[in-house]
Amino acid sequence: MGLFNFKKKKIKKKREALCREADIFIQVHYVRERVSDKNKYNTLVLKSDPDRDACKEWYEKHGNPKTFSEIVLAYLKDSDKDEAYICEKCLFEKNFISNLKDDKNYHPSKGEAVLLAFAFKLNFEETKALLMSAEHSLSNSSKSDLIIRFFIEEGEYNIGNLNYVLDKFCEIKIKDII
């Protein structure tokens, strides 16, 4: 019983630290959306980014997959994980990957896409590309999106910890994000 309580306290301490760090990340990166054209930000071409370049190379190496299903199946093929592990990690039905194989035009919820990005431990650029293929994105004007981004940029892919922080700030779990 003592070891269980120790582990429980350690997890709680880590989650509280993640909450503090996520709060700072949100404060730094949060941008209110503005409807007026006069308040829009300029979009500048950014310098080369190693993660973005690697992501582009990965897509080219895999024949530039376009659909969400094609991209997920390519990541699955590249990973050392099997379908059952991915489904278990994402809390999906056991036949989720089989359904992706059968339905090349599957349109996931944003939460499903993020769960897969976490299961494959994708970096921010890879996650953005995966989300884009599913017609989703991460916004700097959404606290839940900033929390997801924070976790990815920190390399923290524990879904239990993500759900804890999302629940604390937004009263939502990742599977509920549409």
Image (cartoon, helix red, strand yellow):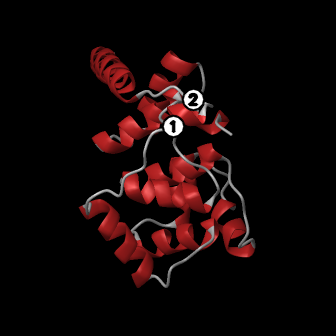
Rendering quarter of residue 154: top left
Label pair 2/1, CB-CB below 8 angstroms: yes
Question: Quarter of the image containing the C terminus?
Answer: top right
- In the figure, 167 relative to 93: above or below? above
Give the x, y percent position of residue 4: 33, 20
Q: Element type at marker 2?
A: loop
Identity of the amino acid at label 2? Arg
Q: Earlier in the sequence, mark 2 or mark 1?
A: 2
129 or 152: nearer the eye?
Answer: 129
- Whole-angstrom CA distance, mark 2 to mark 1, is 7 Å
Which residue: 52% across, 60% down?
130
Rendering quarter of residue 87: bottom right
- In the figure, 69 relative to 166: above or below? below
Give the x, y percent position of residue 95: 69, 62
Which residue: 24% across, 63% down?
50
Which residue: 53% across, 47% down?
114
Judging by the rendered image, the residue that carries numbered circle 1 is 40
- Tell me if mark 2 has few (under 14), some (14-19) or many (20+) residues whose alpha carbon lies within 10 angstroms of its own: few
Which residue: 37% across, 30% down?
29
Going by the image, does 101 lie left or right of 17? right
Q: Which mark is residue 157?
A: none
Judging by the rendered image, the residue that carries numbered circle 2 is 34
Please state the total of marks drawn on the protein image.
Answer: 2
Rendering quarter of residue 94: bottom right
Q: Element type at marker 1?
A: loop
Note whether residue 122 is visible. no
Give the x, y percent position of residue 176: 66, 34
Give the x, y percent position of residue 99: 72, 66
